[in-house]
Every structure is written in C-alpha cells, then in structure tokens.
Image: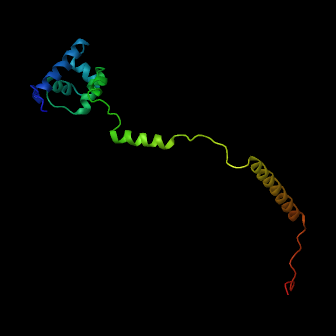
Amino acid sequence: MVQYNPFTDEAVLTEFGKRIASFRLNNNWTQADLANKAGVSKSTVEHLEKGQSTQLLNLVKILRALDLLQQFVNLVPEQGPSPMELLMQSRNLQKIKRKRASKARGDSSGTLQNAKNAATSSATNATATANIAAEPKAGWVWDEDK
C-alpha cells in the first residue's frame, strides 16, 4: 500500500527549522545562545532554522541543548524480539522444564548398605596409606637385584 505524503523533503526540513526557531524563541535564546549551549557554530543554527542540511551530530547537539533529544530518539521505536527469537526462546524454555523428583527404584536398604561399604573401604585405604608412610625406607644396595 502506497501512502501519499504531501511534503517534499525540503518542505519537511523547512518546517523542522521553523519549529526549532520557535522553540528557541520560547526559551528566549538568541541563535548565538543556542549555538553556545549546544557547542556548535552560530551558522549551524542558522542553517538548521532555514531548513538547510546539517550534520546529524550537530542536530543531536542542538536537540540536547533544547531538551528535545528524547523525543527525537522516540521517533524510531525500539523493536522487540523477532518471531524466530521468540520461537527459539520457547523451545529453550521447554528444554529447561523441571522433571518431577522420584525415589530411586529398588530396595532402599541396598542404598544404605552401599554407603556403609564405601565408608569402610575409604577407612581401610587410609590405614594402608598410613602404614606405608610409617615404614622406614631402606637404601638401595649394589647387586641387590641379582
């Protein structure tokens, strides 16, 4: 669908410049005051108010000085996630779903017996290690291996 726009690009720039000038005058600032507050040259303010082209950075500086920058930023709305991103998020959420906790199958006494066996085994290993460390080490003797 084609939309008809009665304004030419030049007409939009001219209207924009008039609005900037009107806003400046409502604040009772001269072009030099606005230029000084924005950190641009006076001729930049003049060009903008006449509807002439100017650098985007200078426009941002002037709008910031006029406290209109937020309205400028809001001209282009922030985009939400794309349909593909939403789909991927929903798939990731399905994968993360918690499973229901359940008891281990089989005899629960067997689990207790396995824990006792593990404790006994580690105690035995600790004792054997201590005995090895306590034995005095004898030096190697020549021709001992024959």
Q: Report if residue 37 is visible in the image.
A: no
Taking the spot 23% from the left edge, 16% from the top edge, the residue there is: 23
Q: Is residue 88 left or right of residue 64?
A: right
Vertical side of 144 occupied by 116: above or below: above
Pinpoint residue 88: horizontal percent, then vertical percent: 40, 43
Pinpoint residue 110: horizontal percent, then vertical percent: 76, 51
Pinpoint residue 64: horizontal percent, then vertical percent: 30, 24
Which one is nearer the viewer's eye here, 23 or 43? 23
Which one is nearer the viewer's eye here, 11 or 90? 90
Q: Is residue 41 left or right of residue 13?
A: right
Q: Is residue 87 left or right of residue 143?
A: left
Quarter holding the N terminus is: top left
Quarter holding the C terminus is: bottom right
Q: How is the image coloured?
A: rainbow
Q: Report if residue 107 is visible in the image.
A: yes
Which one is nearer the viewer's eye here, 18 or 44? 18
Which one is nearer the viewer's eye here, 78 or 113? 113
Q: Quadrant of residue 71?
A: top left
